[in-house]
C-alpha cells in the first residue's frame, strides 16, 4: 500500500476532533496514544528522556496518553528494572514531571498499571529472588512456573494496585488504566489456559472475572466515584494470537458484568485489527469494541492497525489505509467506540494527529 492512497480525498476523520468526557477524563479529541512498553527508565524511575517522549506525543495532538505498562509493587511484577515503577517516592517524582509536561501540552494522561504474572519470563533482572506468581503457577502450556497465588498474596496484590491508583490520583493523572490484556496477570485469571483454580476465582466466566473485579472494586473504594478507571482487555495473548476468553456474546457479558459492577468507567478493547467482526456466527457484525459497548453501555476505546500497513506482530494488511479509515469512520458513526488508540503510527510520527487534523497526510512519517 502506498502513502498516496492515505492522502486520498476521502480521508477526513473530522468527527474525531470532538471532545470526550468520562468522569475525571476530559479529552480534547478522540485520539489516544496506546500503551507501549519502552524499558527506558533505569531503576524504574521516569527520567528526562521519558518526560520529553511523553511531552512530544502530547504536543503532537493526541487527546489521551496511556503510558507504557508501569509496574505495581508486586510481588514479582515483571522482568526488568528498566520498566518504570508506579510506586515509591523516586518514581513518583519522575511521574509528576511527566504529568505536568503532558498537561502543559493540552493532553490527558493515565498510567497503565501492570503485573506480568507468569509471563515474566525465566531470566528476570528485577526482584530476582522472588518467584513469579500467577493464578495457578502454570503458563498457558500447563508448565509449572513460579507458584500459585495464595489468598494472602491476592490481598497483597490488591493493596499494590490500590497504592498505584491512589498515587496516580495524587499526582494529578486523569485516571488509571488496568492492564487486563495480552495474557498478563489479570488476564491470566480470565483465560482458562492459565486459570485452573478451584476456589471462587476459577471456574465459570464470572468466577474468572472475580479477582480482576475485586481489584477494580478496591481501587474504586479508594479513589472515590469520579476518578476514571479504564480496563484494558483482549481476546488475543502475547503467547497465542488465536486465544479467546469469550466465545459468545453471552460469555463476554458474563466476564464483563462483574467488572462493570465493580466500577469500571471505560473499557479499552485491545484488537490487532479494529475492523474485525468478533462473533462471526452472529447477526451483529460488531468488533469486540462494539460488542463491549453494546453489552456494558460504557464508553470504549478501540485500537488495532490504524495508520499502519501490518498487523501488530503480524502480516501485511490487504485493505489500504484509506479503506480502513473509511471503516473506522463507519464504526465510529455506528457508535462502536468513543476513542481510537494508535500505537505504532505514533511511534513513527508523534505529530500524526496534528497532521491528520491539518489534512497533511502525505507529511506523515510511516511506520516501518
Ligand atoms: C513497542 C510496543 C510496546 C507495547 N507495549 C504495550 C504495553 O505496555 N501495554 C499494552 O497494553 N500494550 C502494549 N502494546 C500494544 C499496543 O498498545 C497496541 O495495542 C498495539 O500496538 C496495536 O496497536 P497499533 O496497531 O496501533 O500499533 C505495545 C505495542 C508496541 C508496538
Image (tube, grey):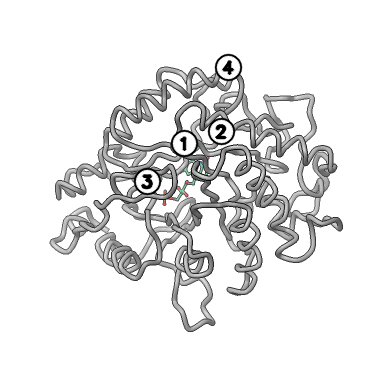
Q: Residue at x 59, y 63 (%)?
A: 242
Q: Which of 59 and 242 is in front in this view?
A: 59
Residue 62: where, in percent of width, then height?
A: 31, 42
Q: Distance between the residues labelled 4 and 1?
A: 18 Å
Residue corresponding to mark 2: 70
Q: How far apart are marks 1 and 2 (CA)?
A: 8 Å
- Disc nearer the start of the sequence (3/2): 3
Packing grade of label 4 (10 A; few <14, some 14-19, many >=20) is few
- Disc nearer the start of the sequence (2/4): 2
Q: Which of marks 4 and 1 is in front?
A: 4
Residue corresponding to mark 3: 32
Q: How far apart are marks 4 and 3 (CA)?
A: 28 Å
Quadrant containing the N terminus in the rendered view: bottom left
State if disc 2 and disc 3 touch (CB < 8 Å): no
Q: Residue at x 68, y 43 (%)?
A: 119
Residue 89's disc is 4
Element carrying mark 2: strand
Q: Distance between the residues labelled 3 and 1?
A: 10 Å
Q: Can residue 368 be seen in this view?
A: no
Residue 284: where, in percent of width, then height?
A: 46, 79
Query: Compared with residue 266, is residue 329 higher up or lower down, i.e. above or below?
Result: below
Q: Which of marks 4 and 3 is in front?
A: 4
State if disc 2 and disc 1 touch (CB < 8 Å): yes
**Assess mark 2: CB under 8 A from ligand 1?**
no
Residue 67's disc is 1
Q: Can residue 34 be seen in this view?
A: yes
Q: Distance between the residues labelled 3 and 2?
A: 17 Å
Residue 345 is left or right of residue 70, and the answer is left
- Disc nearer the start of the sequence (4/3): 3
Query: Compared with residue 215, is residue 156 higher up or lower down, i.e. above or below?
Result: above
Q: Which of marks 2 and 4 is in front?
A: 4
Amino acid at each position: 500500500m502506498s502513502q498516496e492512497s492515505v492522502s486520498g480525498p476521502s480521508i477526513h476523520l473530522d468527527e474525531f476532533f470532538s471532545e470526550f468526557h468520562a468522569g475525571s477524563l476530559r479529552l480534547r479529541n478522540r485520539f489516544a496514544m496506546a500503551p507501549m512498553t519502552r524499558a527506558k527508565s533505569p531503576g524504574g524511575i521516569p527520567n528526562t528522556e521519558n518526560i520529553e517522549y511523553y511531552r512530544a506525543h502530547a504536543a503532537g495532538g493526541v487527546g489521551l496518553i496511556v503510558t507504557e505498562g508501569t509496574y505495581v509493587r508486586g510481588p514479582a511484577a515483571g522482568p526488568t528494572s528498566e520498566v518504570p515503577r508506579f510506586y515509591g517516592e523516586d518514581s513518583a517524582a519522575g511521574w509528576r514531571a511527566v504529568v505536568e509536561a503532558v498537561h502543559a501540552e493540552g493532553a490527558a494522561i493515565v498510567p497503565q498499571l501492570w503485573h506480568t504474572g507468569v509471563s515474566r519470563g525465566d531470566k528476570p533482572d528485577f526482584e530476582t529472588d522472588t518467584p513469579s506468581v500467577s493464578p495457578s503457577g502454570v503458563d498457558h502450556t500447563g508448565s509449572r512456573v513460579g507458584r500459585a497465588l495464595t489468598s494472602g498474596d491476592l490481598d497483597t496484590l490488591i493493596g499494590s494496585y490500590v497504592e498505584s491508583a491512589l498515587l496516580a490520583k495524587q499526582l494529578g493523572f486523569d485516571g488509571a488504566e488496568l492492564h487486563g490484556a495480552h495474557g498478563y496477570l489479570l488476564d491470566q485469571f480470565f483465560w482458562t489456559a492459565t486459570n485452573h483454580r478451584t476456589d471462587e476465582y476459577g471456574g465459570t466466566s464470572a468466577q474468572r472475572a472475580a479477582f480482576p473485579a475485586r481489584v477494580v472494586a478496591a481501587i474504586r473504594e479508594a479513589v472515590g466515584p469520579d476518578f476514571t478507571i479504564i480496563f484494558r482487555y483482549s481476546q488475543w495473548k502475547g503467547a497465542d494470537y488465536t486465544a479467546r476468553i469469550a466465545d459468545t456474546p453471552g460469555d463476554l457479558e458474563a466476564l464483563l458484568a462483574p467488572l462493570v459492577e465493580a466500577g469500571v468507567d471505560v473499557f479499552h478493547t485491545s484488537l490487532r485489527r479494529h475492523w474485525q467482526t468478533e462473533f462471526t456466527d452472529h447477526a451483529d457484525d460488531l468488533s469486540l469494541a462494539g460488542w463491549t459497548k453494546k453489552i456494558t453501555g460504557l464508553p470504549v476505546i478501540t485500537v488495532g492497525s490504524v495508520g499502519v500497513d501490518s498487523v501488530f506482530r503480524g502480516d501485511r494488511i490487504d485493505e489500504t489505509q484509506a479503506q480502513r479509515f473509511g471503516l473506522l469512520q463507519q464504526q465510529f458513526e455506528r457508535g462502536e467506540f468513543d476513542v481510537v488508540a494508535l500505537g505504532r503510527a505514533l511511534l513513527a510520527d508523534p505529530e500524526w494527529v496534528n497532521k491528520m487534523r491539518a489534512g497533511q497526510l502525505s507529511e506523515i512519517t510511516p511506520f516501518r
